[in-house]
Structures are given as C-alpha cells and as structure tokens.
Image (cartoon, rainbow, N blue to C red):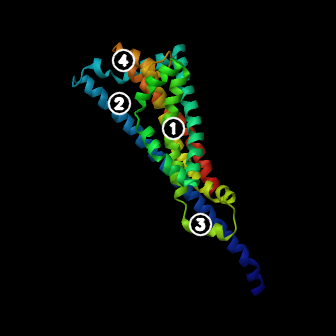
Amino acid sequence: MTTATQANGPAVGQSANAYDDSTILIERRKNRINRNLTVWALRIGVLAAFVVLWSLVVSQGLMDETLISTPLDVATSFVTQLADSTFWVDVMATFSGAMVGLIAGAVLGILAGVVFVRVDVLHVAAKPFLTLMNSLPRPALAPIFILWFGLGFGPKALVAFSVVFFVLMTSTMGALQALDHDIKQLTTSLGMTKAQRFFKIELPAALPSIIGGLRLGAVYSVLGAVVSEMVGAYTGLGQRLVIVTNNFQVSETFAILLAMGLLSMALDASISGVQKLVTKWTR
C-alpha cells in the first residue's frame, strides 16, 4: 500500500499542479476579456454621449448650426472626402512629410541623446543652444523653411523633424541617465567594456522609454507637417483645412480634423505594437 501510494503520489501532485495552472490561465484570460469589454464599452459610451450632446446643442438652438455643423453632416462630409481622389493625394502628402520627419528626427535624436550622455562636457557646452532651438515656435519656422525650400515636400518634413528630434533626444537622455548607479558599478567590477555595457545593459533598459518617446514624436510629426502646410503648400491636409475653413465649410473642416486624428492614431497604434514587442524582449 505504501509503495502504491508513493507511486501514485507524484501523479496526483502533478495533476493538481496542472489543474491549478490551467485554472490560473483561464482566470487571467477571463479577466483580460472582461477588461477589454469594459474599455470598449467606456469608449463607445463616451463617443455616443458626445454625439448625442452635440446633436442636442444644435437641435435646441443653443448654438448656430452654421458654426458647429451636426454629427450627421460631418460623417457625410467625411465619407464624401474618402471618395475624393484629391483627398488621398493630400493624405499621402501629409503622411510622407510626417514619416520622413519622424524617421530622421528619431534616428538623429536618439544618436544625439546617446552622444550627449556619453560625453557630458559636449552636452553642457551645447545645452544653451539646444534650449534656444527647442524654444522656437514651430509655426515660426515654417515660413523660413518655405522661403528656403519652396512650397514642396521639404518644409513639412523639416518642421516635423524639428519637433521629433528634441522629443527623442530628451527621452533617450532621460532613459540612459536613469540607469541605476549600482548596476554601473557592478558591470565595471565584472570587467565589462563600455560598449558591452551599452549594448547589453543600458540600451535594453532604455528602449521602452525611447519607444514611448517615439509614440509621442509620431503624433507631433503629423502636427508639424500640418502646421507647415497651413502656412503654405501645394498639397496636404493642412492646406486643405485652410481652404475649407476660409470658405466656411464647417462640416468639411471637422471631417479633415477627424482624418488627421485617425492618421495620428494609426501611427501611434503601429508604434505601440513595436513597444509591446520591445517590452517583452527587454524583460
């Protein structure tokens, strides 16, 4: 009996552990599904409440319809714009300028952040000039870039770059400087070179913060491109927005703003996916 009990003991223990593990996984999955359902319910509820409130404000005469339009008119204008081929030309003009500014600003911003952290005296020397350049309002830079490069692709990419560069430089420097001093001492005692410490310790630890800065930079890149187009451009959502606003086409104005928001959300969602992968890799 003792032998039989001992023989059956591990099997029973293993089945109990398997049961416990499967139960925990099921509970986690249920909690995740419930959380997602709650999130989407809140989102839909807030959107529905906003649309209802907007409709009531117009229908009750609290605000003039010619000034704020109606949700139905905005939706109709948005669908009409989607069917217009010139609308997609403007979307691509804005998106391409924003993407070039985002990529160039991210690469150079990250490199600058790494260099300034590694060479502190260089950062101290350049800090007043960096602060001065970062404090310049981006709409003020757009006319200068247009004067230099014309009403084409260049100005919108440069304005987007000017925003993204400082966002990524700041986030990179903050992430690298936040590394625990004890870890630095430990790597030194283990005989790791500076290059080994950077690629094996510092960079993986800083990546989540850098990707977070990239998400913010993606939104700002679209904003920078649109600002430049509003000042002057041949094509783009910013130029389209100026035209419909000057013609008092309020529903078309809101439709274009909605398109800009969706474009920024698409970029943010793409980078958010990369951030999740990076977070799993660095754990």
Q: Tell me how far mark 4 sits from mark 2, CA to CA.
A: 22 Å
Which quarter of the rendered picture does the N terminus lie within? Answer: bottom right
Marker disc for residue 245: 4
Which residue is at the front of the view, 28 or 87? 87
Kindly report the distance in space between the C-alpha atoms of the residues bearing marks 2 and 3: 52 Å
Residue in view at x 52 percent, y 59 percent:
178
Q: Above or below — where is 60 with respect to 269?
A: above
* Three-letter amino acid code of the residue under disc 1: Val
Instruction: Find the distance from the CA under tag 1 to the CA under tag 4.
Output: 28 Å
**Badge 2 is on which residue?**
51
Mark found first going from the N terminus, 1 or 4 = 1
Instruction: Say which of marks 2 and 1 sits in front.
Output: 1
Residue behind mark 3: 183
Looking at the rendered image, the quarter that the C terminus falls into is bottom right
Sequence-first disc among 2 and 1? 2
From mark 2 to mark 1, how far is it between C-alphas?
33 Å
Question: According to the image, label 1 marks what residue?
Answer: 164
Determine whether the residue tagged by mark 2 lies in a helix, strand or loop: helix
Q: Nearer the viewer, residue 101 or 120?
A: 120
Q: Amino acid at mark 2?
A: Val
Going from N to C along the chain, the mark reached first, 4 or 2, is 2
Q: Label 3, label 4: how many angstroms apart (C-alpha)?
A: 56 Å
Residue at 48 percent across and 21 percent down: it is 146
Is residue 38 placed above or below 55 in the rendered structure? below
